[in-house]
Image: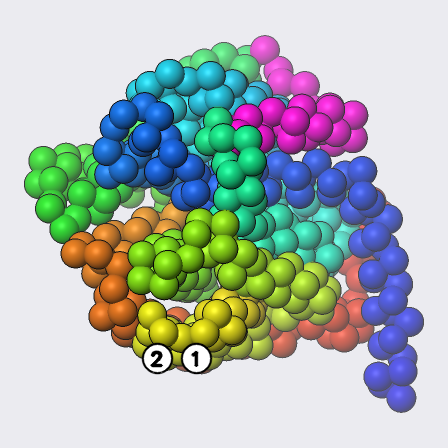
Amino acid sequence: MRAAAAGPAEASTHDRQYKLFAWPFTTPLYVGSALNPINSSIIATATVPIAAELKVSVGATAALVSALYLASAVAQPTAGKLAEVLGPRRIFLSGIVLVLLGGLVGGFGQNLTMLTAARILIGTGTSAAFPCAMVMIRRRAQDSGLDTPPGGVLGGLAIAGMATAAIGPPLGGLLVGAAGWRWAFFINLPVTVIALVMALRWLPKDPPLDRADSAFRTIADRIDLPGIIGFATTMTALVIFLMSLPQPAWAALAVFVAAAVPTAWWELRVTAPFFDFRGLAANTTLTRTYLRQALTLLGTYTVMYGMTQWMEAAHGYSTVQAGLLLLPMGAASALLSRPLTRRNLVRGPLITAALTMLIGSAAIMLLTSHSPALAVVLVSLIFGVTSAATTVGNQTALYLAAPPDQIGTAAGLFRTFGYLGTIASSVIGGIVFHDGASDDGLHSLGLVLVAAGVVVLLLTVLDRQLMARSTANTPTNAANAAPNPRKENHA
């Protein structure tokens, strides 16, 4: 009887979410959120032809990868904070314009400096979409009295996020092979124009800013400008140091320490900090969500980049063939993300992500240069499940754990930790493949990922708060929960 009674209420909740988050509202958010992960991975297939045409070493083109990582790691929480203060639509549109500019600069670039500048513009611009989307979604849900996470909408963001990242290598391979490396940049032009038109037409306008609130000094105080500058300096130095391994840039490490100490001192004393150390210490569920995201993306990006290098060097596959063999990872991730998010599950998907990461990592240790293509496809499929489950579980956990008025900054930090995992995967790949992408190096990668998977599993199964949140926010419990009269009247 209880299950039957819950059915209509649950259906009513889904109908309400469908009306609140109709496709005109969600489509520009999805398109914008897909730009960052695609641009993160699409460049992988263009570095060799770029190096050949510009007459630089392939190693020098690594700056194009690290430039976007660095810009994104710094810009994601910054964009989230600006969205909270100035309005998410304004920041979303500003980000799209930066991506459009980056696509033009890169597509017409004549040297590595111009291409690096283009990647910084693209990284900064694409970083606005996800935190702005989370702010708009959370505000619309809160203003309408919606007590449960809008699972279908978060599922769309999940597909636009990690799922599309796996499409980057095969898409890049096809574009570069057919039209040349410049289309790794030019591809942003039609997409950003479409996103810009949709956002201007369909996204709700932000409230007007009062003249006093729009003054630079007022904005700087509200967004904690010293904290942002300190965070940017610290993250930049850390990323440069990590990307320099295994030949460490000690100067970058010294800058990191010199910037981190005063930044931490400031953030612990300011009233509204940009990077809330006390808040993270108190909200351990959110902190563990960040750590799980970083470690799991370490695994998925290691597969996308590390296995691509190994397939080309040790297995003899072309760039296009290697990208196509990894395409099932993106397909599996996209197909699984949507149905998982509709149920607002957290703990189950995260345990699944950890277990499949362990299984896939162990399978990597069994691959050799004589393994059939089917074995590579199976590993790709396993990590596709990992990608979908971790994105869904962690994204919903973020929505539930982050304070509503700080969802933009929290969403940005969520992506920043993800980029730290991505950067770590690049560093580890560079170390184990230092003398070439061999079977031994691939097996070393698998061993590292097994260790990371164990940590992810422990962070999930030992998290009692995560279990409580997951139980409290299932559709059945939410449907049977008493409505909030104040919120309903406000809506």
Q: Position of residue 30 (x, y in %)?
A: 66, 43
Quadrant of the snapshot with the N terminus: bottom right
Which residue is at the front of the view, 90 or 109?
A: 109
- The residue labelled by disc 2 is 366
- Can I make out residue 78 in this image? no
Q: Quadrant of residue 440?
A: bottom left
The amino acid type, in three-letter code, at marker 1 is Ile
Whether residue 24 is in magenta: the answer is: no
Which residue is at the front of the view, 388 or 471?
A: 388
Q: Is residue 309 above or below residue 28?
A: below
Identity of the residue drawn at 33% across and 19% down? 111
- Please say which color scheme the image uses: rainbow
Left/right placement of residue 183 relative to residue 479 reads: left
Q: Position of residue 346 (x, y in %)?
A: 58, 69
Q: Position of residue 150 (x, y in %)?
A: 72, 56
Which secondary structure dominates the residues rendered in magenta?
Answer: helix
Residue lying furthest bottom in this view? 1
Q: Is residue 384 above or below residue 110?
A: below
Whether residue 189 is in magenta: the answer is: yes
Identity of the residue drawn at 67% across and 57% down? 155
Left/right placement of residue 405 relative to residue 3 reads: left
Identity of the residue drawn at 74% across and 42% down? 26
Disc number placed over residue 359 in the picture, else none: 1
The amino acid type, in three-letter code, at marker 2 is Leu
- Can I make out residue 155 in this image? yes
Q: SS class of the residue under badge 2?
A: loop
- Answer few, some or many: residues within 10 Å of disc 2's Cα (few below 14, many 20 plus, some between 14 and 19): few
